[in-house]
Image: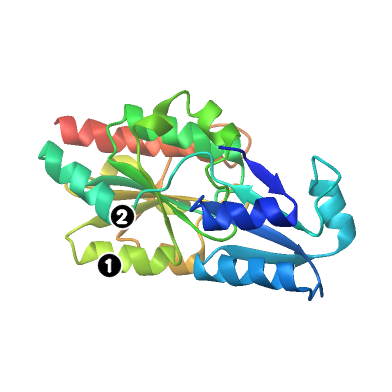
């Protein structure tokens, strides 16, 4: 599946054929019939629509013939949260899920999916907005893990946490201001929440977490790469589960 589709007919066909379009970029204030049809199809699929200036479209374009519309298509199909929970049930294991709060770097997303697979997590949940989608870069960086680890996309991460709490899950997020991760009980059905590369976990999402875990750091700088933090915290969950 192509990662980027340009041109009115090609983009419209992508929607009508059922391809998973992560984002649609449309020339701002363009009101002609074909573009309105594309926008209508995008809204049916709840695709994120960005209305931008021609200069932005020219920057994004790989063909130079975008005709005012560019669609960014997922390289892999998304799963659902229910799919992830069912995978845990099929294995007879307590759910272990990664939730990513606005991870925007596709290399970080791919690396986290790889870690999730190796740590035995049942899936990864990402938000629709302000986050990297399942691009070919993510697939490559995951080193094949994307073929085995389901990724679900949700409209509201905080709401999803609330819904999963009703299923008996607990949630831990990584944050410098938390309790030392070794002192927390991270056994049982667990969701590991990792925040944005620059801002960390957002306040609203952090407030919904049951635990805030601090990773011990002894160096001269005060933060870890998001994918490294995800690996460290995930393997503390693995260690406690093994005990």
Query: Label 2, label 1: how many angstroms apart (C-alpha)?
Result: 10 Å
- Left or right of 196? Residue 160 is left
Q: In the rendered image, which quarter is residue 62 located in?
A: top right
Estimate how packed mark 1 is, as few (under 14), some (14 to 19) or many (20 or more) residues with alpha carbons within 10 Å.
few
- Tell me if I can see residue 228 in this picture: no
- Left or right of 78? Residue 238 is left
Residue 223 placement (x, y as % from top left): 57, 41
**Residue beneath the point at 51% across and 59% down:** 128
* Element at label 1: helix
Q: In the rendered image, which quarter is residue 166 located in?
A: bottom left
The quadrant of the image that shows the N terminus is top right
Circle 2 residue: 81
Circle 1 residue: 163
Q: Which of 171 and 92 is in front in this view?
A: 92
Residue 192 placement (x, y as % from top left): 35, 48
- Left or right of 168? Residue 72 is right
Whether pointer 2 and pointer 1 mark residues with C-beta atoms closer than 8 Å, the reply is yes
The quadrant of the image that shows the C terminus is top left
The residue sitting at the top extreme is 143
Residue 41 placement (x, y as % from top left): 57, 67
- The tag on residue 87 is none
Which sits earlier in the primary sequence, circle 2 or circle 1? 2
**Which of pointers 2 and 1 indicates the residue nearer the eye?**
2
- Tell me if I can see residue 66 in this picture: yes
Q: Is residue 14 above or below residue 45?
A: above
Q: In this view, does 153 lie above or below 159?
A: above
Q: Nearer the viewer, residue 175 or 74?
A: 74
**Residue beneath the point at 37% across and 39% down:** 233
**Residue beneath the point at 51% across and 50% down:** 19
Residue 154 placement (x, y as % from top left): 42, 61
The residue sitting at the left extreme is 92
């Amino acid at each position: 599946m192509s990662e980027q589709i340009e041109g009115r007919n090609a983009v419209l066909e992508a929607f009508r054929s059922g391809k998973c379009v992560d984002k649609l970029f449309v020339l701002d204030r363009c009101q002609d019939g074909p573009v309105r049809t594309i926008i209508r199809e995008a809204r049916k699929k709840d695709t994120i629509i960005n209305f931008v200036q021609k200069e932005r479209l020219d920057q994004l374009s790989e063909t130079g013939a975008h005709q005012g519309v560019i669609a960014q298509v997922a390289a892999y199909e998304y799963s659902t949260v229910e799919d992830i929970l069912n995978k845990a049930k099929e294995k007879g294991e307590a759910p272990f899920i990664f939730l990513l709060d606005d991870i925007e770097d596709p290399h970080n997303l791919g690396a986290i999916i790889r870690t999730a697979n190796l740590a035995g997590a049942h899936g990864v949940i990402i938000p629709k907005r302000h986050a990297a989608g399942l691009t070919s870069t993510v697939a490559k960086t995951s080193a094949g893990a994307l073929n085995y680890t389901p990724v679900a996309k949700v409209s509201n991460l905080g709401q999803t946490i609330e819904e999963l709490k009703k299923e008996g899950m607990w949630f831990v997020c990584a944050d410098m201001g938390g309790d030392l991760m070794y002192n927390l009980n991270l056994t049982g059905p667990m969701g590991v929440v990792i925040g944005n590369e620059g801002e960390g976990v957002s306040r609203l999402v952090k407030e919904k977490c049951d635990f805030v875990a601090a990773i011990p750091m002894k160096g001269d700088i005060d933060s870890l790469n998001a994918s490294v933090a995800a690996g460290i915290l995930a393997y503390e969950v693995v260690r406690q589960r093994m005990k």
